[in-house]
Amino acid sequence: LAGFFTGIGSGQKQNLNSADGGSASKRLNSTSSRYDDDSDDDEDDAVEMESRRQKEAADHHLAVHRHNWIKHMSLMNDMKSEHPDIEVRAMEGLAGVDYLTPGALTNHLSYVFGPVIAALKGVGYQEGVNLDACPYDWRLPPSELEQRDRYFTRTMRTVENLYEKSGGMPVVLVCHSLGTKAGHYLLNFACAKAGRKWVDKYVHTYMPVGAPHLGAPKAMRASLTGDKMGLDTFLGDSEALAMGRSFGSGPWLIPSVLPSFAPANVYVRREGAFEIAIRSTVDIGPLVEDRDEVDLPKKLQLVLRYGERVLRTTYSPVQENKVTFEGKFVFSTGPDGPFAERCCSCCCQCCILRCSCCGACGDNTLFVSLNEPGIKAARGEKKKTEARKRCCSEGRALIWLKIISCWYLIKWVLILFGYLLYCINYKLWVVLADKINKSTDRSSQIAVGCPISMEQFVGDTGGRDIQVELRDDLEKSKCCRKVLENVPVVTVNIRWIPAEMKGNGRSKDCQVAEMKNNQCRRIGVLSAKHDKATWDYDASSGYGILKNEGYESALCSISDYYDSDPLAPRDGSKAPPVKNIKAIYGINIPTEVGAVYRRRKAVVERKHKVVSMYKLDHYARAEPKGLDGYVLEKGILRETRETPQMLDGPTKFKSSATATEFLRCSGDGTVPYWSLQYVRTWEKHCKVSITELDGAEHRAILADGRFHKTLIDYVTIMDDAAEKQV
């Protein structure tokens, strides 16, 4: 076998270890040795402190490694360029595809093609003679692989070298998962560059293993909500989402057009949303003119409260009593607008949160407030101020009368003692509470805008600017509020996002999980009871939800790097230009074929941080009769061994499950059956044979003995009792 193995390369991790691991371990060792010199007095305490210190150093070491690893692996916003001064490349040869973490104790956990290589070497194949590998940077779209690395040109040279070294024996290309898409592209590339004669001479068979010929719906969910790729203890949710969305190869696996008998990849809860954009500079001078200079705020944040949901901007620095805020906030609503108002149970006449019958609270109202770190009671004010009304002078006169009436020495002593005790304790606790609140990033309100009724913005999809005046706390009585001559103002743009998904007017230019004639297999009636409401769902194309998500870079990538590529890397419907195809894949593992999404209740978009507008809807339910072999759990729709499947291609292909017009089975746990078996349709263009392995999981098939036997049987020929290798 002159092999072409494509898969995840372990070179990235090893290169990073050599770049940073040594210095980090040296820092850890030097820290421990310094402490050992001071541990003579109390050995037990020293051991405990050293253990704690080593743990802190190890945590710091892991944090530094995680940050560096993510920075090295992630690409820039164009989904193809690496960050400045960073260069990560796949390892060359078999070492780049055997094991992620080679070792006697880790091989069984981190294998890729390692078991396959061992099986082939066991029957006589030799590395560099009739066995080799061509790892690739799986983060890039195929056109960039050629432009940056000359990958497909170099792979053609590797195939030619194996052909010559093995005595003129043609090559079998063994590809797995995303590597099957790269192998398909290689054949198209070679045919376009060197002609069909080159392929017929040097390539004997194209062998896709677990191939997502038409894509995999799981890739759509990874683009929307993130995929940790098995690194759950290493990556956080936001880190996995940001890194995954930077890969230009992600759209390669998203289906372009779904078969007519397949369910939709995307089901979305029918709900609208308000998008609130703020970009404004606020002059806070009138609000802090009574403050002592040392107590002027250094940073401020805006807080938006819509119903029970609260969103905050990051703190912005205050410069010359001016602060600039910028951000975008999204609050989900019912499909026709704001939710029905609910009356507050603790409302009172003097509180800003009056009941809904007063029109000042409920889920229909937006409040914008200005907050500072800590608690406001700790801020000092000037003793003499002319900014307050004197309407409370009558109350002060009454206090003086009470003091004069208590003209007894002992009473004065008690009053003085109590006052001093009160002042000392009060200030002490105020300062302590202020420090605690600052350390926990809690804030206090210094100004608030008047309530904004959101019903007026329903249907206004173009957005509208409004001016929100920020005044001193409305919770104070009227006589205690400051009279502001120049009221600070913040500009807010409010836009209504309707429940209907945006359609793709140019669906031929950017196809994302499109349904033929807007039809798909019906999965019963989806509904949910949540938040005291009953929700309905719509089947949608991937274009609509990616557009609403704001994931424009993926749509641009599909248009620029895939659909405009003359070799059509996402079009799995076209057969590769090769004489023989031997497809091997697993079946009858529950496999994801779609997902049900709903909007997050409240989302704030910030610079340099990727957030998802949607999440899986765990409340979605379907009628059992309508599922017909599918299972809907926690928002993920899976096919099972009881799911009816239609066979594509000539009827001579029969699955391991007996059927006439259709059969019941499922995919390999990652790729659905309708994508795996699409290879049947290529029989008109080349010789196709298929082997289905019951219970073989997508990755585990590489270590499956049945696969090894099928592979070895295919590439060895018994001739005159002598075993020859092809």
Image (cartoon, grey):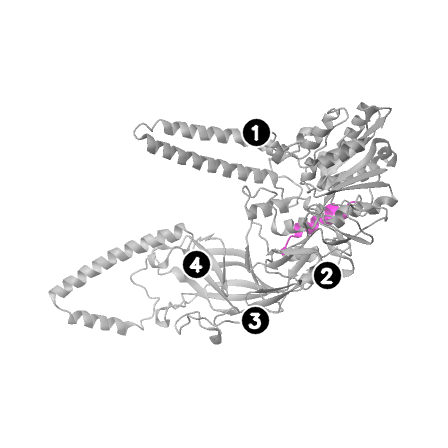
Q: Which residue is mark 1?
A: 18
**SS assignment at label 1:** helix
Which residue is located at x 41 percent, y 62 percent? 286
Image quadrant occupied by the N terminus: top right
At label 3, the amino acid type is: Glu
Any part of residue 578 in sight: no
Secondary structure mostly seen in the magenta stretch: helix
Instruction: In this rendered view, identify the residue nearer to me: 268 or 427.
Output: 268
Nearer to us: label 2 or label 3: 2
**SS assignment at label 4:** strand
Specify whether residue 279 is painted magenta: no
Left or right placement of residue 493 versus residue 525 in this view: left
Q: Quadrant of residue 624?
A: bottom right
Q: Quick one: which residue is furthest to the front in this view?
A: 658
Instruction: In this rendered view, identify the residue nearer to me: 339 or 128.
Output: 128
Q: Earlier in the sequence, mark 1 or mark 2?
A: 1
Q: Which residue is mark 3?
A: 455
Crowding near the residue tagged with mark 4, few <14, some 14–19, many ≥20 C-alpha atoms within 10 Å: many
Residue range of the region highlighted in magenta in the rendering? 549-565
C-alpha distance separating marks 3 and 4: 26 Å
At label 2, the amino acid type is: Arg
C-alpha distance separating marks 4 and 1: 46 Å
Q: Earlier in the sequence, mark 2 or mark 4?
A: 4
Left or right placement of residue 667 versus residue 479 in this view: right
Q: Earlier in the sequence, mark 3 or mark 4?
A: 4
Nearer to us: label 2 or label 4: 2
Q: Which residue is mark 4?
A: 371
